[in-house]
Amino acid sequence: MEINVIIGLVGMVFILLAFILDEFYKKWSQNTIKYNLINIIGSGLLVYYAVTLGSWPFILLNGVWLIVATVKLVKIVRK
């Protein structure tokens, strides 16, 4: 398996992990640092993977996800 595929799979696991934990555990929510950090890492890895594929729809999707999670994290930290 190529390293790029592994990076993409790890990114996907991070995004899904944040989502699943948010759905089932009260300590995890979209307003926590850990939730947004996991989304930033996951979406960053997925942006990298999408770039290696030249897949513009997924570059855009995950790029926006990365930006939104980063902005949210900055807002949380500033509180």
Image (cartoon, rainbow, N blue to C red):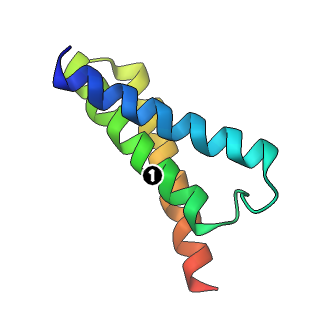
Q: Quadrant of the N terminus?
A: top left
What's the residue at 24%, 17% (across, down)? 53
Residue 64 horizontal/vertical position (percent): 48, 42
| Residue carrying label 1 | 40
What's the residue at 48%, 60% (across, down)? 70
Choose top left, top right, bottom left or bottom right for residue 18.
top right
Choose top left, top right, bottom left or bottom right for residue 32.
bottom right
Which amino acid is tagged 1? Ile
Choose top left, top right, bottom left or bottom right for residue 44.
top left
What's the residue at 38%, 26% (across, down)? 9
Task: In the rendered view, tell whether residue 75 sits above or below residue 71.
Answer: below
21 and 70: which is toward the camera = 21
Q: Quadrant of the C terminus?
A: bottom right
User: How many discs mark residues in the rendered view?
Assistant: 1
The residue most toward the bottom is 79
Task: In the rendered view, tell whether residue 44 sits above or below residue 73.
Answer: above
For the residue carrying disc 1, how many other residues have a C-alpha within 10 Å: few (<14), some (14-19), or many (20+)? many
Residue 77 horizontal/vertical position (percent): 55, 80
70 and 6: which is toward the camera = 6
Query: Disc 1 on helix, strand or loop?
Result: helix
What's the residue at 53%, 38% (across, down)? 15
52 and 22: which is toward the camera = 22
Q: Is residue 60 left or right of residue 19?
A: left
63 and 21: which is toward the camera = 21
Task: In the rendered view, tell whether residue 52 sits above or below residue 67.
Answer: above
Q: Is residue 64 left or right of residue 2?
A: right
Residue 40 horizontal/vertical position (percent): 45, 52
Residue 6 horizontal/vertical position (percent): 28, 25
